[in-house]
């Protein structure tokens, strides 16, 4: 994170812990709706939220939308009926959840979007620099290939963070005159789907030299396909998931992941929500969280 973000985070979390007794007496209730929980990235967010809420004596309600915007809206409506004070919203569709944001604000609930922003009167958005993440991973890939060769993008579900990662990747690849982007195919951020997609990629493009995956879940499927083919294809990705970091540390075809910090996102998001609740008037509308390249040199020492 930047120095400013670190300062904001430290100050607000210190204040949160100092007032945990009052929060418990008031029965602080926090709701968080995730776009999915079948992903270590979001599971680590949930763990961090539970830890932070426990320090505040707060109650937590968590739901999994399963990438279904109608379910996510329904889940938020249920949370509002249960009297939540804070809604942490990880939208499965930034535009589609606006009705849920409007409903929450109509009941005086603080709304903080986490990881992906949402339409409507959101109080604050906390999310990774996804475009930077895609850019750094694909710049790393291009440099590892010596600036030439055929590469592919293993795309994912069309939510804003994924779109931004692809945008950043393409911007980096355009800096290499000898790099050709031959195909972009959707692995849906799923290991088994990505495995089949990349197997077909490898068969279709005999000169394929590199692949960028929009997340580590897809990348693990891509890695299995690469290893099964016996081809020398370099793989980069975004997330920093433990399994991906381990594969990089072992010196596989998976050479880099640009790590994000899901635990920090939810911690900062909750801290800012509390600041809103306590009447702060200068809470940032948006807090971008920095990302970090993880490769063979630092993988052994990295974890979320």
Image (cartoon, rainbow, N blue to C red):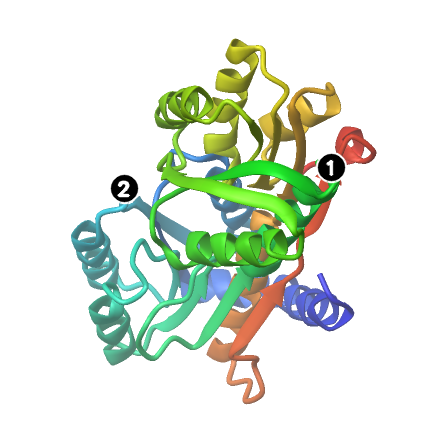
- Above or below, 126 relative to 297: below
Tell me the SS state at disc 1: helix
Please state the horizontal and vertical placement of residue 21, each as a whole percent of the image.
56, 62
- Above or below, 260 relative to 231: below
The residue indicated by pointer 1 is 144
Furthest residue toward bottom: 281
Mark 1: give few (<14), some (14-19) or many (20+) Cα within 10 Å. Answer: some
142 on left or right of 25: right
Tell me the SS state at disc 2: loop
146 or 226, which is in the foreground? 146
- Above or below, 267 relative to 201: below
Q: Residue at x 59, y 25 (%)?
A: 243
Nearer the observer: mark 2 or 1; the answer is 1
150 or 98, which is in the foreground? 150
Mark 2: give few (<14), some (14-19) or many (20+) Cα within 10 Å. Answer: some
The residue indicated by pointer 2 is 66
Specify which label sits upstream in the sequence, 2 or 1.
Answer: 2
Give the number of callouts.
2
11 on left or right of 184: right
């Amino acid at each position: 994170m930047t120095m400013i973000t670190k300062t904001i985070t430290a100050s607000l979390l210190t204040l949160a812990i100092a007032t945990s007794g009052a929060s418990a007496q008031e029965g602080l209730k926090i709701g968080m709706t995730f776009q999915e929980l079948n992903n270590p990235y979001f599971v680590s967010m949930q763990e961090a939220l539970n830890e932070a809420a426990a320090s505040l004596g707060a109650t937590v309600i968590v739901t999994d939308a399963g990438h279904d915007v109608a379910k996510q809206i329904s889940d938020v409506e249920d949370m509002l009926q249960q009297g939540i004070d804070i809604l942490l919203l990880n939208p499965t569709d930034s535009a589609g959840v606006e009705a849920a944001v409007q409903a929450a604000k109509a009941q005086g609930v603080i709304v903080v979007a986490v990881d992906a922003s949402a339409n409507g009167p959101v109080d604050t958005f906390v999310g990774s620099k996804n475009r930077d993440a895609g850019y750094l991973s694909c710049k790393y890939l291009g440099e590892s290939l010596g600036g030439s060769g055929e590469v592919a993008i293993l795309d994912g579900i069309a939510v804003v963070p994924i779109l931004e990662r692809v945008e950043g990747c393409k911007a980096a690849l355009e800096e290499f005159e000898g790099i050709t982007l031959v195909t972009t195919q959707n692995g849906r951020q799923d290991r088994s789907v990505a495995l089949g997609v990349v197997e077909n990629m490898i068969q279709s493009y005999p000169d394929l030299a590199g692949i960028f995956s929009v997340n580590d879940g897809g990348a693990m499927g891509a890695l299995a396909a690469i290893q099964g083919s016996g081809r020398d294809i370099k793989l980069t990705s975004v997330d920093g998931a433990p399994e991906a970091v381990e594969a990089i540390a072992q010196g596989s075809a998976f050479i880099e992941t640009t790590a994000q910090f899901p635990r920090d996102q939810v911690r900062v998001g909750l801290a800012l929500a509390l600041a809103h609740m306590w009447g702060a008037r200068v809470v940032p509308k948006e807090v971008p969280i920095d990302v970090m390249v993880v490769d063979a040199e630092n993988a052994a020492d990295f974890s979320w």
